[in-house]
Amino acid sequence: MNRIKYVEFPPLGDNRGSLVALEAEKTVPFDIKRVYYIFGTLLGVARGFHAHKNLKQVAVCVTGKCRMVLDNGIEKKEVWLDSPTRGLLIEGLVWHEMHDFSEDCVLLVLASEHYDEADYIRDYQEFLKVNK
Ligand code: T46
């Protein structure tokens, strides 16, 4: 799907367990300006319901899982984020929602810009209009 891509993070494992390194411009294809994580999401709660105008993000469930609903204005897609070695790159205008968080889910997000509420489109009709 346009504007969405999986990114693989090779696990650097040995007999002690696993380690994943996330590096700007390498495993993550942009300069990382912000990192946030979502955890402790209550059962049945959905989050997101917005698109970003310019932000690039990579989202990865470092533990647990959640379902992401993605919409680029042309097609819709659902993906499960359920692996600490596979992230989802979201570039440009993509309406996204997160559902079905497992109790143990920690959704880590790496972002290309500092937090800016003006970059959010939180109204779906506006998203469709801007996307034309
Ligand atoms: C996204 C999805 C995947 C900040 O003050 N700084 C931040 O960096 C972030 C991300 C949020 N906030 C504030 C804004 C709200 O008052 O934290 C509150 C919760 O944010 P929001 O309702 O936007 O959370 P989600 O889970 O709906 O969306 C978040 C990100 O905001 C968004 O960029 O793509 O996760």
Image (spheres, rainbow, N blue to C red):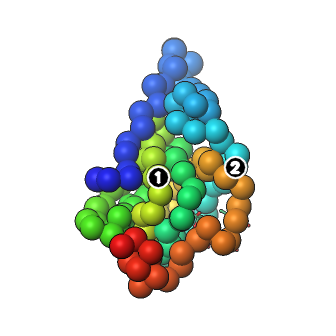
The answer to whether any part of residue 115 appears in the image is yes
Going from the N terminus, do you reach mark 1 or mark 2 first? 2
Q: Residue at x 67, y 52 (%)?
A: 113
Disc 2 marks a residue whose amino acid type is: Arg
Residue count near mark 1 (Cα–Cα under 10 Å), binned few <14, some 14–19, many ≥20: some
Ligand 1 within 8 angstroms of badge 2 C-beta: yes
The answer to whether any part of residue 104 appears in the image is no
Q: CA distance from mark 1 to mark 2?
A: 15 Å
Disc 1 marks a residue whose amino acid type is: Glu
Q: Residue at x 42, y 63 (%)?
A: 94
Q: Position of residue 3 (x, y in %)?
A: 38, 53
Q: Position of residue 56 (x, y in %)?
A: 54, 51
Q: Residue at x 51, y 15 (%)?
A: 14
Residue count near mark 2 (Cα–Cα under 10 Å), binned few <14, some 14–19, many ≥20: few
What residue would you read off at disc 2?
Answer: 34
From the viewer's perspective, tell me whether residue 84 is left or right of residue 1.
right
Nearer the observer, 83 or 129: 129
Query: Relative to 35, does residue 127 appear above or below in the rendering?
Result: below
Query: Relative to 37, does residue 14 appear above or below in the rendering?
Result: above
Q: Position of residue 1 (x, y in %)?
A: 29, 53
Label 2 secondary element: strand
Nearer the observer, 83 or 91: 91
Query: Relative to 13, does residue 122 appear above or below in the rendering?
Result: below
What residue would you read off at disc 1?
Answer: 91
Q: Dividing the image into four equal quarters, which quarter contains ligand 1?
A: bottom right
Q: Residue at x 45, y 43 (%)?
A: 87
Disc assigned to residue 18:
none
